[in-house]
Image (cartoon, rainbow, N blue to C red):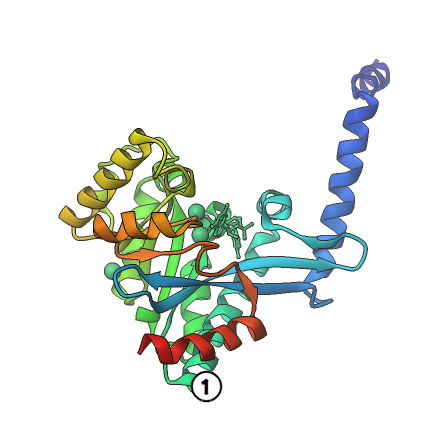
Amino acid sequence: QAKSKGKSAYERFSPEMKEVSHERLQLESRMRRALELNEFELYFQPIIQTATGTLTGAEALLRWNNPSMGMVMPDKFIPLAEETGLIIPIGEWVLEQACAAAVRWQQATGLALGISVNVSPRQFRDPGFVDAVLRALRNTGLDPRRLELEITERLILDNTIETSDILSRLDEEGVRLSVDDFGTGYSALSYLKSYPFDTLKIDKSFVRDVMREQEDASLVKAIINMAHSLGLKVIAEGVEEEDQTHFLKAHGCDYSQGYFYSRPAPEEEFAVWLKTNRRAQM
Ligand code: C2E
Ligand code: MG
Ligand code: MG
Ligand code: MG
């Protein structure tokens, strides 16, 4: 009987579902080998002080170069990396590489730039997470105050005691903490007063139409004002047009990031950008 039950369960999978799970398995087995085959690469996108146009740091964005799939974007593989736990070794690699890059830039240019690293929920809740952060800092010699960890609103709202404990430990070490994609979670704003965040990153969905939609303009202004009255800095994500930079400047948005300044780029390209933009900005 158990056998026939098993069979009918199997038959409930449509051909499409079988295809999807085959694709997932293939993606997963390729991802398992990707670290040792050195297929991951960090891209860097400048973070600009809005008022002056000065470069203050960069966000590290993960790319996966696979021989048979080409360049795979994070939205395509991070969710599966989360589910399988592979995000933990991958995340440690990202932390270490990102910190090392910031140290290299300082050696090359003298600029003490900040480096922002995305952290996903599974990684954040792993018992070894804080140690992995401290290890990356120690191994590379980066000043903790130059590392900013980006955490999404969704993660913060999920569980409280643990989250609060981890955030406090990182804060005590001097690491900066930011809320990524701000405004897209369930926005129980009370967490902002109890957790040691330094920065809010306004989600690009609000920034995109800020010059066309009155509601988006109002929301962006309100977020900037709220953040400042709580003692937080604000970064606008997804800045693509010059008009947006004027708007953000006029309303006191501290930092900006987006294609208008630069697309995320491989380190060699970012280093060139750094050299050529440096003189004008200092
Ligand atoms: P995010 O942290 O919110 O990163 C910003 C995303 O917006 C990036 O997409 C970036 O390329 C894109 N972007 C930047 N400027 C513009 C712009 O002007 N216009 C538009 N339309 N988009 C812009 P990307 O690189 O595909 O990354 C997507 C998401 O994947 C990230 O969102 C982040 O949540 C996640 N991610 C990326 N790297 C890592 C990583 O190392 N670890 C983890 N856990 N997640 C990562
Ligand atoms: Mg981010
Ligand atoms: Mg702090
Ligand atoms: Mg974001």
Q: Read off the residue under disc 1.
A: 108
72 or 272: nearer the viewer = 272
Q: At 33% from the left edge and 52% from the top edge, which residue is drawn?
A: 245
Asked if residue 23 is positioned above or below residue 69 in the image, the reply reads above
- Residue 123, percent across and down? 49, 52
- Residue 99, percent across and down? 46, 72
- Residue 268, percent across and down? 58, 75
Q: Is residue 265 visible?
A: yes
Q: At 39% from the left edge and 58% from the top edge, which residue is drawn?
A: 149
102 or 17: nearer the viewer = 102
- Mark 1 burial class by Cα count in 10 Å: few <14, some 14-19, many 20+: few
Task: Say which quadrant the C terminus sits in.
Answer: bottom left
Q: Is residue 222 left or right of residue 176?
A: left
Q: At 36% from the left edge and 34% from the top edge, which residue is drawn?
A: 212
Asked if residue 253 is positioned above or below residue 172 in the image, the reply reads above
Q: At 40% from the left edge and 61% from the top edge, which residue is drawn?
A: 130
Question: How many marks can you see?
Answer: 1
- Residue 230, percent across and down? 16, 47
User: In the image, what residue type sits under mark 1?
Assistant: Ala
Task: Say which quadrant the N terminus sits in.
Answer: top right
Q: Is residue 120 left or right of residue 112?
A: right
Q: Is residue 233 visible?
A: no
**Secondary structure at numbered mark 1:** helix
Asked if residue 16 is positioned above or below residue 168 in the image, the reply reads above
> Residue 188 sits in which quadrant?
top left
Q: Residue furthest left?
A: 229
- Ligand 1 under 8 Å from disc 1 Cβ: no
